[in-house]
Amino acid sequence: MSSSPVAVKVRGLWTCFGKRVIHQDLDLTVQRGEILGIVGGSGSGKTTFLRELLGLMQPARGEICILGEQLGSPGAGSQRCLGRRWGVLFQQGALFSAFTVFENVAFPLREIKALDETSIRDLVMLKLGLVGLQPSDACKMPSELSGGMIKRVALARALVMEAELLFLDEPTSGLDPVAANDFDQLIMDLKNALGLTVVMITHDLDSLATACDRVAVLADKHFLAVDTLDAVARVKHPFIREFFHGKRGDRVLNCLAHPHQQKDS
Ligand SMILES: Nc1ncnc2c1ncn2[C@@H]1O[C@H](COP(=O)(O)OP(=O)(O)OP(=O)(O)O)[C@@H](O)[C@H]1O
């Protein structure tokens, strides 16, 4: 296992669909133990970038190093093995609708065929508790769960292999503000308790302000800025002005600058 302080390193990454260039010479470094938020306009290539980080898609050019291992390089540990060190939470949770909560979370453990049923049961129940679900939720079907609970089950499944790194795609989408805030808090608690590194795609300004240590802004095929929210919001670019300085953006940034006033605003 690598002890590098860098969890994700991307260098000179180009993505093309036919002649269309989506990413041009992207560089990104994510430190271990940080929560990085990625924002960008619709179609800027956030999901495509995430797919490349997950090894689901090959970039046209460039290098991606995850937890010290270069994606696609022979002999650097199989991608399957590396996959066990990271977890993914897809936008809609992507639970198996015909499986109970317990079976959904147990699924990756059963796939590796290395644990007996008692160990699987103990691990699943531990992870359900970690994400704030009750033991009685284990036998529920996904159709019986709220949006927030579905995200929590998906998170438990992403963590069940003892992931060191979590990739989250729009984790708070579809949640009301209270559930979204609870979920952000859960991500921060897990980061602190488990030392997780988190890379999340999000449009949610509140998530960026409360949960993310740094923000990467993807626009015009590049990362325009990768910095704290405060610093990023000061970059002069039309996308940043529109995204961070609408009415809601200014409120969030104001709360960030004056946290003691947050309750009054
Ligand atoms: N398989 C594909 N073939 C061709 N073009 C694609 C393919 N996948 C994505 N694209 C194009 O690449 C661009 C980036 O898509 P992507 O889904 O990564 O954007 P995004 O930033 O995640 O957008 P959104 O926020 O709307 O989900 C889009 O213009 C999309 O149409």
Image (tube, helix red, strand yellow):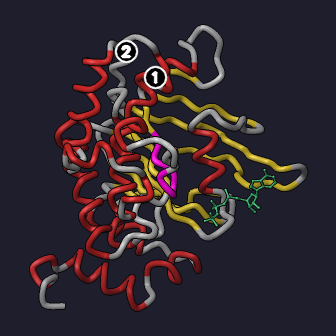
**What residue do we see at 24% from left, 63% from top?**
182
Asked if residue 88 lies left or right of residue 118, the reply is right
Give the Cα distance between marks 2 and 1. 8 Å
Q: Earlier in the sequence, mark 2 or mark 1?
A: 2
Which residue is denoted by mark 1 in the rendering?
68
Asked if residue 66 lies left or right of residue 139, the reply is right
Task: Where is residue 120? Give x, y as percent.
Answer: 31, 22
Q: Is residue 241 above or below residue 186?
A: below
Dot in front, 2 or 1: 2
For the view shown, which residue lies furthest in the top direction?
75
Nearer to me, 207 or 111:
111
**What residue do we see at 36% from left, 64% from top?**
146
Q: In this view, does 57 lie above or below 95?
A: above
Nearer to me, 252 or 28:
252
Q: In which quarter of the image is residue 193?
A: top left
Contact check, label 2 and label 1, Cβ < 8 Å: yes
Which mark, residue 145?
Answer: none
**What residue do we see at 43% from left, 36% from top?**
87
Which mark, residue 1?
Answer: 2
Task: Where is residue 51? Give x, y as percent.
Answer: 62, 43
Q: How crowded is mark 1: few (under 14 residues within 10 Å), some or many (20 or more)?
A: some
**Overall secondary structure of the magenta section:** loop
Stretch in magenta? 88-93
Please name the amino acid that badge 2 sits on. Met
Disc count in the image? 2
Mark 1 Cβ inside 8 Å of ligand 1: no
Q: Is residue 253 above or below residue 24?
A: below
Membership of 183 in magenta stretch: no
Q: Residues within 10 Å of mark 2 (few under 14, many from 20)?
A: few
